[in-house]
Structures are given as C-alpha cells and as structure tokens.
C-alpha cells in the first residue's frame, strides 16, 4: 500500500505548477552572467507554466515591484555589508514566501545563501562562480565556511563539472547536478552565409580580467602569421591597459577595436559582424558568451577548462586549446584563417545547430524542472 501511495505522489508531482522564488544579487538591468542566467531561466520557467518571483537588489531607476517578461520582480534596498545584508534579506524572503505561498527557493550566487537558512521549503542553489574554485586552491583553513553555508541546501546545480566536483570536495553531501547555462536561440540566430570575407573577424566578448585569459589572448594575436584578421573586443576591465600595450608594442593596434561594455540587447547584431568567438579563460562555466556566439553561427575557439569542453565538439563546432598557452591559441587561430569557405560554413552550421538542440533555454528549464520535482 505504501509503495502504491508513493507512486501516486510521484505521478501527481508531474503535473504540479510551482510557485518559485529566484534570489539573485544581480538581475536586469544589471549586466553580467548571473543576471542573464537568472533572467533567462525565469522566463523559460514562466513559459513552462510556473509562477516565478525574483527577489533582487533595488537599482537606480527601477521600481520596487514590476512585471518583466511574465516574472514578478521584487527589488529591495538593502545594506551590502554582512551581517546586515543577511538579516535584511532574510526578512524580505520570509515576507515574500508568506505573501505568495512560495513552493521552492532557487538561489543564484553565494551572497544571499545564508539568508535562506531556517525556512521550511526546499532550497536550490546554483553555484555559478569561478571564485568558488579559487577558494579551493587555498589552504583548507582559508577556504571559508563553504560547507556550513550549504548545509541547509536541498539541491545544488552547477554549470560545469568542475563546479560540481568542487561542491562535493568541500563536504556537501546532498545531490549535485550539472545543468548548463542556456541561450535564447530566437534572439541569437545564425547569420547568413552568403558573403564570406577572406579577412576573418575574431570577437572577444567578456570582462577584461585575469581569469578570462585576455592577456594571453592579446599575446596570441601578436603571434599569428596570417595578416587576414581583425578583432572586436566587447568588454571592460582591469586588463585592458595591459592588452593595449601588447598591441602597441607589436604594432597591431590597427587590427583591434575596443568597443567597451555592450548591452546584451545589442550583442546579437555584434556577433553578426564576427566570424569566430574566442574564449581564452583560465576558469569558466558553460560560457553564456560562448552559447550566444554558437547560436549566432560562430565557431568557438576555447580553452579546455570548466564547461567550455561541454560546449565545443572539437573539430566539428570549434576548437579546444590548453589554457595559459598563447602559442597554442595563435596556432589554432592561424589554422582557421586558412580554411576555405566550405569548411567555414560546415563549422558555422554545426555550431548553431548544437546551440539549438542542446542549449536553448527551454531545454535547460525542463532539465531544471526535473530536478525541482525530485526534491519536492
């Protein structure tokens, strides 16, 4: 009898439409990978029929409560310093749960996690950050209270197998699953392949910081033998000056255009100006920039770290290289510059098709929904 009742409950769960609360420090109009992930996953969950609320920080010019793409967005003004942040966020979370009968909380990023302790509903945590991996490189005594922070969490999701392994390594014993970042394949669609230029454009679309390998990328550009290339760099950061000095010394600054920070709404048009997208990262989850590039028909050249190998089918949709290796990166870039139009078209079509079949946000949301229902 007990077995039959259990089966009945499982079958009924398949038809539950959930009330989900996402908690994220970053959410549009704020830019960044976590903000984009939370927004796109929330939109996809709404399309699956769930009611989604987002609790996030109040930013200049935004309303305290608004409807965005079918999502109820609650923005709160809160002190950033801990423990005041945790106390204030916990108060807002409890009120939102009570007022909206929330079934499940999904936390994006480490900072809000402590504020979800002591709640009588399941807590899901998506471990986005490569900073988590950096902590594990330190002596165990300096790694912080990572295990303690996760003890109350029902389920951990991570967009790279490295982050999954790191979560288990700190002693978390609950379920941990890999779930990729996703991409809106309607917004980012493959470019036309009618007029293919001999001179190819590489795009680097990311923050210009050390962990993204941007200085190695700059050094690689100075080693390319073919003259038939130019470069678009969309992003800002602390390494920009070092990159500019490398280009100036090598006298290739005329081949490189720094565009600065670009709104995500403008990125689709920018990808269509490029031919290849480069991910020279030292740490990386399943890169949102990489996914947007793929959906736009750009083959990827990426380092063999984190979630990047999951994106690239080496030699079919792009190419993998070792991290921290400017020579290897330059060699592959020279190789793709030698391809004829037919080879480029094959790579481009394979890249966009892989994005549609494996990484569209609808696919990712259904995977996530499956894990939600396991803990309910």
Image: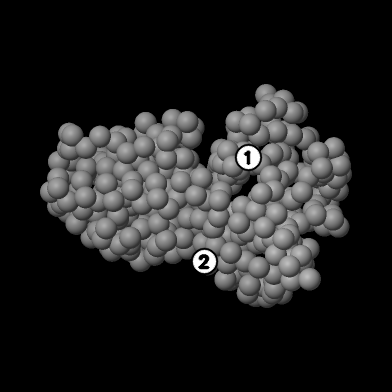
Image height check: is 300 above or below 314?
A: above
Disc 1 residue crowd, few under 14, some 14–19, many 20+, Cα 10 Å: few
Q: Position of residue 193 (x, y in %)?
A: 21, 37
Query: Badge 2 is on which residue?
Result: 161
Disc 2 residue crowd, few under 14, some 14–19, many 20+, Cα 10 Å: many
Q: Nearer the viewer, residue 149 or 69?
A: 69
Image height check: is 162 above or below 115?
A: below
Q: Quadrant of residue 314?
A: bottom left
Residue 276 visible? The answer is no
Q: Nearer the viewer, residue 306 or 154?
A: 154
The residues bearing labels 1 and 2 have C-alpha atoms spaced at a distance of 29 Å
Does residue 62 appear to the left or right of 148 in the view shown? left
Q: Position of residue 368 (x, y in %)?
A: 59, 54
Q: Nearer the viewer, residue 138 or 57?
A: 57
The numbered mark at residue 49 is: 1
Does residue 366 appear to the left or right of 317 in the view shown? right
Does residue 173 appear to the left or right of 137 in the view shown? right
Q: Quadrant of residue 267?
A: top left
| Residue at image point 27% right, 42% down | 275
Sequence-first disc among 1 and 2? 1
Give the secondary structure at mark 2.
helix
Give the secondary structure at mark 1.
loop
């Amino acid at each position: 009898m007990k077995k039959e009742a259990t089966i009945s409950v499982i079958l009924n769960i398949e038809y539950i439409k959930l009330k989900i609360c996402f908690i994220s420090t970053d959410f549009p109009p704020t830019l960044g990978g976590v903000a984009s992930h939370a927004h796109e996953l929330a939109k996809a969950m709404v399309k699956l029929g769930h009611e989604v609320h987002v609790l996030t920080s109040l930013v200049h010019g935004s309303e305290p409560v608004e409807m965005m793409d079918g999502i109820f967005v609650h923005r709160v003004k809160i002190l950033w310093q801990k423990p005041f942040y945790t106390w204030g966020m916990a108060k807002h979370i409890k009120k939102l749960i009570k007022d909206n009968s929330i079934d499940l909380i999904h936390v994006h990023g480490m900072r809000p996690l402590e504020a979800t302790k002591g709640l009588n509903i399941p807590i899901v945590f998506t471990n986005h950050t490569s900073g988590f991996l950096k902590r594990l490189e330190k002596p165990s005594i300096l790694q912080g209270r990572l295990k303690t922070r996760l003890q109350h969490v029902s389920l951990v999701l991570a967009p790279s197998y490295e982050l999954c392994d790191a979560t288990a390594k700190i002693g978390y014993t609950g379920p941990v699953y890999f779930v990729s970042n996703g991409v809106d394949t309607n917004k980012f669609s493959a470019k036309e392949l009618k007029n293919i230029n001999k001179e190819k454009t590489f795009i680097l679309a990311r923050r210009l910081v050390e962990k993204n390998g941007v200085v190695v990328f700059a050094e690689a550009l100075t080693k390319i033998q073919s003259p038939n290339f130019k470069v678009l760099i969309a992003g800002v950061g602390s390494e920009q000056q070092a990159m500019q000095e490398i280009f100036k010394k090598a006298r290739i600054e005329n081949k490189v255009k720094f565009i600065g920070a670009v709104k995500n709404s403008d990125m689709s048009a920018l990808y269509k100006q490029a031919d290849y997208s480069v991910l020279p990262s030292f740490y990386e989850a399943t890169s949102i920039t990489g996914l947007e590039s793929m959906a736009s028909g750009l083959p990827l050249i990426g380092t063999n770290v984190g979630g990047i190998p999951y994106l690239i089918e080496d030699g079919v949709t792009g190419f993998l290289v070792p991290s921290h290796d400017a020579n290897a990166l330059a060699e592959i870039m020279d190789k793709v510059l030698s391809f004829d139009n037919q080879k480029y078209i094959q790579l481009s079509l394979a890249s966009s098709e892989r994005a549609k079949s494996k990484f569209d946000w609808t696919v990712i949301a259904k995977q996530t929904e499956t894990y939600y229902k396991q803990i309910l």
